[in-house]
Amino acid sequence: MFGISPLGWVHTLGSLPAIPAAVYMFARYGRIVPGSRAGAVYFVSMLIGAVSVFLVAHQPVSYGIAVATLIFLLAGYGVGKFWKASGVANYVETILLTLTTFLLMVPTVTETLRRVPDGQPFVTDLKSPVLLGFQAGLVVMLIVGLSVQLIYLRKKGKAAAL
């Protein structure tokens, strides 16, 4: 179904829980929160997805996205342990983990549009205006979302200092 191999299904189903976990955390906390239960689901799911890409990917860019995702994910979950006393930790953590969500959504949207509906996908060419429009929308969401997150963290930090 959808031209996905059994190993591809492991990759897809293993990484899928990261999406609702991220949506939940963005709605509840305004960012990915590593110490939450949803943060644990996000971490494991992202790890499964990023590592399994090396077994299913067909394009070199996929390996680059996987490596960047792993670096940002591990750094984002580790930054609080090293910079706990620093006010910079929340900013760095937020930026890194929001980037992992972006790196999850770009191939998710791309592969969904290239496979759905089964047999007659919306997109057959990687240079399709529809696909490029969705990807541009993700970039705008990243820029706006990160800006809002950083402004919120700054206001929250100022309020805590009072």
Image: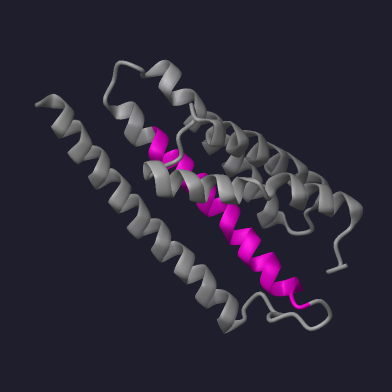
Question: For the view shown, which residue lies furthest in the right direction?
Answer: 6
Q: Residue at x 50, y 51 (%)?
A: 23
Of residues 93 and 13, the one nearer the viewer is: 13
Q: Is residue 78 above or below residue 65?
A: above
Quarter of the image with the C terminus is top left
Any magenta on residue 102? yes
Q: Residue 132 at what x, y percent from top left? A: 54, 75
Of residues 161 and 114, the one nearer the viewer is: 161
Q: Residue at x 25, y 44 (%)?
A: 152
Q: Residue at x 69, y 46 (%)?
A: 15
Tell me, what colour scheme is on the image? one colour
Q: Quadrant of residue 70?
A: top right
Q: How many marks?
A: 0
Question: For the view shown, which residue lies furthest in the left direction?
Answer: 162
Q: Quadrant of residue 120?
A: bottom right
Asked whether, in this view, residue 103 is left or right of residue 52, the answer is left
Q: Is residue 145 above or below residue 74?
A: below
Q: Residue 82 at what x, y percent from top left? A: 42, 17
Any magenta on residue 97? yes
Q: Residue at x 29, y 28 (%)?
A: 88
Task: Tell me the magenta residue range.
Answer: 93-117
Q: Is residue 72 above or below residue 77?
A: below
Q: Residue 58 at what x, y percent from top left? A: 79, 58
Q: Is residue 140 above or below residue 132?
A: above
- Give the overall secondary structure of the magenta segment: helix
Quarter of the image with the N terminus is bottom right
Q: Residue 14 at what x, y percent from top left? A: 74, 44
